[in-house]
Image (tube, grey):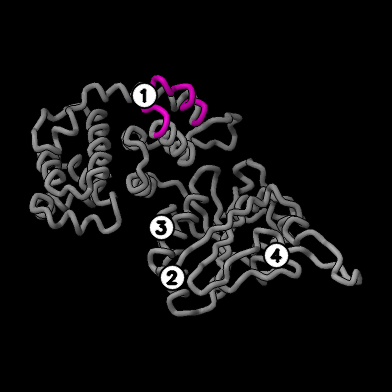
Amino acid sequence: MSDIKMTNIPSMNVGKMVEKLSSAYCAIIQHNYPIKTMPSVMLWGPPGVGKSQAVRRIAKEIGEKTGKTVNVTDVRLLLFNPIDLRGIPTANADKTLAVWLKPQIFQMDASDNIVNILFLDEISAAPQSVQAAAYQITLDRVVGEHKLPENCIVIAAGNRVTDKSVAFKMPKALANRLMHIEIEGSFSSWKQWAISSGINDKVVGFLSFRQSYLMGFDPDSNDLAFPTPRAWEMVSNVLNWIDDDIDSMYYLIAGLVGTGAAVEFRTWAKVYKNLPAVEDIFDGKMPQMPKDTDVMYALMASMTAYARMHKDEMSRIANSIRYADKMPPDFSAVLLKDYMCIDKNYKEKLMTIPEFARWLQTKGWLMNGSV
């Protein structure tokens, strides 16, 4: 059986994929078309690239744009066998026929104000007998005697065979029932999400300075820990919720992204001792501007994180923009572009600040060339 080839399907970063799919689903929902008008989607990509996170972002976008409650049912098919999908057989009331008890995963709310997303994750890691049981779900939206509600979106995801993770070749009959999209790593897309989601500023600053460390997956390597967007999110959780001292957390960080990336991260983080006080900047003071590039990336990440925490204090945001105007132009462009990612439509709030409007008039053209 030949493998599914990735050369003839579209490749998108997570941000673009979320935009395209959420827009398509919202158009269908807002026009009251049947959700099954949209074929089931298959997301391909290496481990940790952000497929699962993308489905949650799609759910959020649909909820915000349609006003409906969106429920995500996450099914890890690797852990299932065919009977788990169909349900447990039992006798009917008069003991003459076998009936199948509906699995809990199909117990969805069919109300008009609800949208359900059935996320069939790790479908390519499931044995072909389980993949075969997914045929009916993806096309007919039924499994045996059980039918998905009309308000249910079906999205599947999995690793490619070439990733050398646990992956079985997808049968062509199943492949032909799906809309295929390959997810590619993109630092700019990840950074926009990271800023709006509160990813630790040290993680954002380091990866802004060393973008190649965002995704370090190598299918030919036997390493157990390696950097991926998912691994860096876990590093952020360690720093945000346990201790933000990278020296103290070094071994935990190394256990997530590997010793090579962890050493580089710990070494880079020493630049924080050279940062001006970020609070002083937002208070309207003008501390000395750093000169070293690595320190500038740390400063921009710290300022963006502080701005996110005080996003409604527009006078203090204005103070930081005055300070940013003293930065080398390329760095100020990156910083203000990051500010616009703090919240949806935050650019409109920034436009009410005269300092920001002036910066756009004089240096806004740099936005296109900023990293």
Chain part drawn in magenta:
241-256
Q: Residue under circle 3?
A: 16
Q: Give me the C-alpha separation between circle 3 and circle 1.
A: 34 Å
Residue that label 1 marks? 245
For disc 2, the neighbor class at 10 Å (few under 14, some 14 to 19, many from 20) is some
- Judge left or right: residue 321 versus residue 171: left
- As measured in the structure, the alpha-carbon distance from the residue carrying label 2 to the one carrying label 4 is 25 Å
Q: Secondary structure at mark 2?
A: helix
Residue that protrudes farthest toward the front in the picture: 93
Which residue is more in the foreground, 35 or 8? 35
Question: Quadrant of the rendered structure where residue 88 is?
Answer: bottom right
Q: Secondary structure at mark 3?
A: helix
In this rendering, which labeled residue sits more in front, label 3 or label 1? 1
Question: Residue visible at 49% across and 52% down?
Answer: 183
Vertical position of residue 343 compared to residue 116: above or below: above
What amino acid is at disc 2?
Answer: Cys
Image coordinates of residue 228 in percent, x first then y, are 48, 38
Q: Circle 4 sits on which residue?
A: 135
Question: From the image, which quarter does the N terminus lie in?
Answer: bottom right
Residue at the (26%, 45%) spot, across then down: 308
Mark found first going from the N terminus, 1 or 4: 4
Please tell me the numbered disc located at residue 26. Answer: 2
Q: Is residue 283 above or below residue 33?
A: above
Is 3 placed above or below 269 here?
A: below
Residue 146 as seen in the image, left or right of residue 318: right
Q: Is residue 213 visible?
A: no
Residue type at the position of mark 4: Tyr
Residue at mark 4 to residue at mark 3: CA–CA distance: 27 Å
